[in-house]
């Protein structure tokens, strides 16, 4: 094999190696983009599910004689309001509301009463925890947030 042929083969191999590296980087970026889209869609489903739960609770309050003011109070509870002491996401993930508050308290983010009511104070604490832990700070305790937060509940303090 002549020198020119060897150089050509070497250049061809270098080119293939370079292209394969670019392809894997592009694939990795595509996977990251798709994962971000899935996470955003999951968060939106959680928000919509919570809104539906709040609306149902408001209607039950109204039917029970709570009137318009009872309905407004239930609807204003907004995202993350727990029903029956359980915090539930659209994907079916459930956790007792008090566990969220206990973990936030142990982590130093929640100073309120651990009462199982996920209101503005709890949602603000969730959002602060999310921000400090590189998560989307939406105040909703989804699977990703709970995965990081639960270690505080399990920690002995």
Image: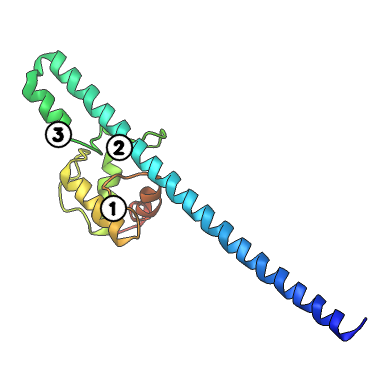
Which badge, 1 or 3, is on the more N-terminal residue? 3
Q: Residue at x 45, y 44 (%)?
A: 38
Q: Quadrant of the N terminus?
A: bottom right
Q: Are marks 2 and 1 in contact (CB under 8 Å)?
A: no
What residue does disc 2 label?
47
Labelled pair 1, 3 in contact (Cβ < 8 Å): no
Horizontal side of 47 relative to 28 (left or right) equals left
Mark positioned earlier in the residue sequence (2 or 3): 2
Q: Is residue 84 visible?
A: no
Q: Nearer the viewer, residue 126 or 14?
A: 14
Q: Quadrant of residue 2?
A: bottom right
The one of 51 and 80 positioned closer to us in this rendering: 51
- Residues at marks 2 and 3, CA–CA distance in whole angstroms: 14 Å
Which residue in the structure is indicated by mark 3?
Answer: 76
Horizontal side of residue 63 vs 127, given as left or right: left
Work out whether mark 2 precedes mark 1 in sequence or the reverse, and give the earlier one.
2
Q: Position of residue 89 (x, y in %)?
A: 35, 36
Secondary structure type for disc 2: helix
State the residue position of label 1: 137
Task: Please provide percent x and percent y for residue 83.
Answer: 25, 30
The answer to whether residue 17 is visible is: yes
Residue 36: % across, % down: 43, 50
Label 2 to label 1: alpha-carbon separation: 13 Å
């Amino acid at each position: 094999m002549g020198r020119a042929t060897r150089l050509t083969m070497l250049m061809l191999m270098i080119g293939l190696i370079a292209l394969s590296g670019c392809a894997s980087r592009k694939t990795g970026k595509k996977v990251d983009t798709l994962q971000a889209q899935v996470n955003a869609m999951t968060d939106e489903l959680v928000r919509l599910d919570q809104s539906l739960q709040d609306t149902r609770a408001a209607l039950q309050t109204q039917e029970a004689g709570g009137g318009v003011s009872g309905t407004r109070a239930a609807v204003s509870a907004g995202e993350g309001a727990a029903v029956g002491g359980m915090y539930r996401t659209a994907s079916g993930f459930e956790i007792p509301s008090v566990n969220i508050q206990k973990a936030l308290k142990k982590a130093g983010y929640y100073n309120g009463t651990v009462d199982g009511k996920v209101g503005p104070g709890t949602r603000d604490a969730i959002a602060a925890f999310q921000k400090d832990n590189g998560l989307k700070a939406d105040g909703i305790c989804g699977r990703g947030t709970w995965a990081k937060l639960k270690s505080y509940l399990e920690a002995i303090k």
